[in-house]
Image: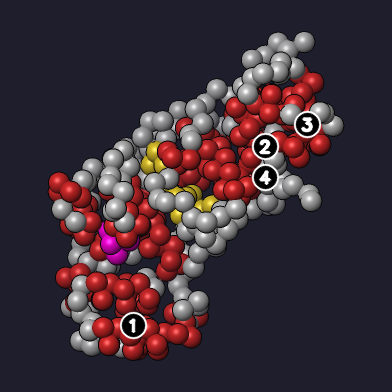
Amino acid sequence: MNTFSYNPKMIELARESRGFTQTELCEKMNVRQGTVSKLENNELFLSDDYIEKISDILNYPKSFFLLKDEIYPPSLIYYRRKAKVPGRTQKQFEAQMNIIRIHIEKLLKRVEIPDANLIDWDVEKHGQPEKAALFLREKWRLPKGKIENITRLLEDNGIIVIRFDFNTDKIDGLSLFTVKNQPIIYVNSQLPSDKERLTLAHELGHLVLHFSKITEKDRDLEKEAFRFGSEFLVPEFDFRRSFAKLNLKTLANLKRFWKVSMSSLIVKASNIGILTPNEEKYLWQQMAPYRLREPEELDFAKEQPSLVKEIIEVHKQDFELSSIEIAEILSLGVDDYYYYYEGNLRKPLQIIR
């Protein structure tokens, strides 16, 4: 007999996080088609037997299905227009992002980190995205010129950075706020270092410019976030002073200094009127061999998020908890815990077709 109050929404979350459809989970459970749908919609009694089967198949502990945490709908997970990714893939990473958010909320009940040091900027009232970027740089007391490590900068200002496998190259990054308004940026783990930095600045732009706001449909929010990110990482005033004439060799040197891609610097130079249309066209022609992969000799090391690791370490050192005990607190299997928080021992369970 079921002596617990299982949460049917956690079945859906667990199922989608593993990439299963309702029909596929029914087949794995050896139950009639439609059973999982009824369980998830609370139309069928969630017995211990059902939970035992689901727990075994989806590789989540039974305690996972007792969680009462809020599950964010996609509209609250990220602001940007949805990229064209398969529905199953999208549901999977949305579920995993939700699960990680729930974990972080649990961990932050024991550990205090800085409150989010953000600004609330309305483009229509306060001015263009570039102005917001410069205002935030001033608020954070940043020196002129480049930002050496944007990942550390974000974490120092209460923004949690998670390197995340979206299982697609069509999503660079997404962001959300926890229940207590702690911002989280998920950045695609497959990105090269230059694109990762701009993605973090881009998502910062969404957090500042777009969350909790009603915007006109004709506004290009992605372009606004890019403009914010570009100005935040490469302020126009300093950029103009960093070269005399823009050519391929100059672009390579500028990438080494600013730590952003050559292509993004061309776009910036065009947007601020440094390049004539013919000059821009010529640069793109020269960049043709590097559109998919810029020269390897210009690569630089990726920045490493550390805030979540520090939170885990506090639990281990100050609360004397083992990895297994932390996994239990998070209602997570040990393999998944290690994958998400202590190194990629293996990828989480995937469906076998």
Position above or below: 159 against 83: above
Labels 2 and 1: the sequence-earlier one: 2
Amino acid at pointer 1:
Leu
Labels 4 and 1: the sequence-earlier one: 4
Position above or below: 224 against 48: below
Q: Characterize the magenta stretch by its predominant secondary structure.
A: helix
Q: CA distance from mark 3 to mark 1?
A: 59 Å
Q: Which residue is mark 3?
A: 33
Find residue 51 and report its image quarter: top right
Q: Is residue 1 magenta?
A: no
Mark carried by residue 19: 4
Q: Which residue is mark 1?
A: 251
Q: What stretch of residues is rendered in magenta?
A: 225-230
**Closest to the observer, 266 or 307:** 266
Q: Which residue is mark 2?
A: 15
Residue at the (35%, 57%) spot, across then down? 222
